[in-house]
Amino acid sequence: MKGDCETSEVYITTTTDIIATIRTLLVTGVFQLKRSWKLTGVPLRGHTNMGSVVGKITEEQPKYDVTETKEGEYETRLYAPSIAIETTQGISEKDGKPFMKLAGYIGVRSTPQNKEQQAISMTAPVVNVKPQEGDTGDRMQFVLPSSLTSPPEPTEGSDVTVVHRSSKLMAVRTFMGGWSESLFESERDKLLELLQRDGVDIVKPMYLEVYRYNPPWTISSMRTNEVAVELVTVSPETVSPETVSPETVSPETVSPETVSPETVSPETQD
């Protein structure tokens, strides 16, 4: 009887914890939604669901093949070519402004800001191409749905351009958490250390992208993020006929069938 009581108490405590957790998630989620709406101006209608609050990702993602996996550390992916829209982001500029320029193109807030006024589905992740030599800041991109092979031109003055992303071999490290620059830099450094350990060559100067899969209203600890570094691709080595010298042919490579009667002179016979 005592054992039953103890089990009952544990069950009630566990259930209470679960209910409290769900309540916290719901309250936090609603707060995040309202806060995101206030900061970015993105309306909730048609562009969010409660699943996204806790990190569920339902948007289309770029196509790639995984070529190697280092469990818990990183994986290498061969990304297929794709089309994206892009805008620049100044070094001191917050994410909200460039995000809204791209969101305007696909029609998140109101009438799509493209010449055909075509509404376009949101995809994941939001891509930030980190500055290289000569750049003044990040370039933010939305990869467009794969079904959109001829995207409409952006409206004039929107500061948005359509760009073609070539196929790339990328080393990608996945992690959960917020969007602080220090966190992304820390994960980038970890990835570079792992690649150096494994003798994997990266493209130089380094080409680095940051991927954010969730909207601003997702609970911070449940956001999926990635850092990605482009790798050097090695084409298969070809062997030309000139590389094979006569010395490479050993006697063992000559079978009896290759010797005809005509090749044996009478003098060689007993």
Image (cartoon, rainbow, N blue to C red):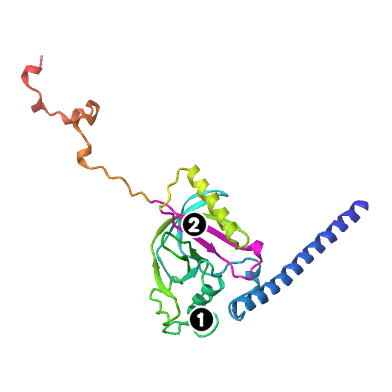
Q: Amino acid at mark 1?
A: Gly
**Which residue occupies the foreground of this view, 205 or 250?**
205
Residue located beneath label 2 in the image? 228
The residue positioned 54% from the left and 51% from the top of the image is 189
Quarter of the picture containing the C terminus is: top left
Residue most toward the right? 1
Residue located beneath label 1 in the image? 107
Is residue 105 found inside the magenta-colored segment of the image?
no
Q: Residue 225's spot in the image, x, y percent?
A: 57, 60
Residue 226 as seen in the image, left or right of residue 54: left
Q: Earlier in the sequence, mark 2 or mark 1?
A: 1
Image position of 14 with respect to 34: above or below: above
Secondary structure at badge 1 equals loop
Image position of 115 with respect to 32: above or below: below
**Which residue occupies the foreground of this view, 8 or 109?**
109
Q: Amino acid at mark 2?
A: Ala
Image position of 12 with respect to 120: above or below: above
Residue numbers of the magenta segment: 205-232
Q: Residue 266's spot in the image, x, y percent?
A: 6, 19
Q: Does residue 47 appear in this view? A: yes
**Which residue occupies the foreground of this view, 92 or 145?**
92
Mark 2 Cα within 10 Å, few/some/many (few <14, many 20+)?
many
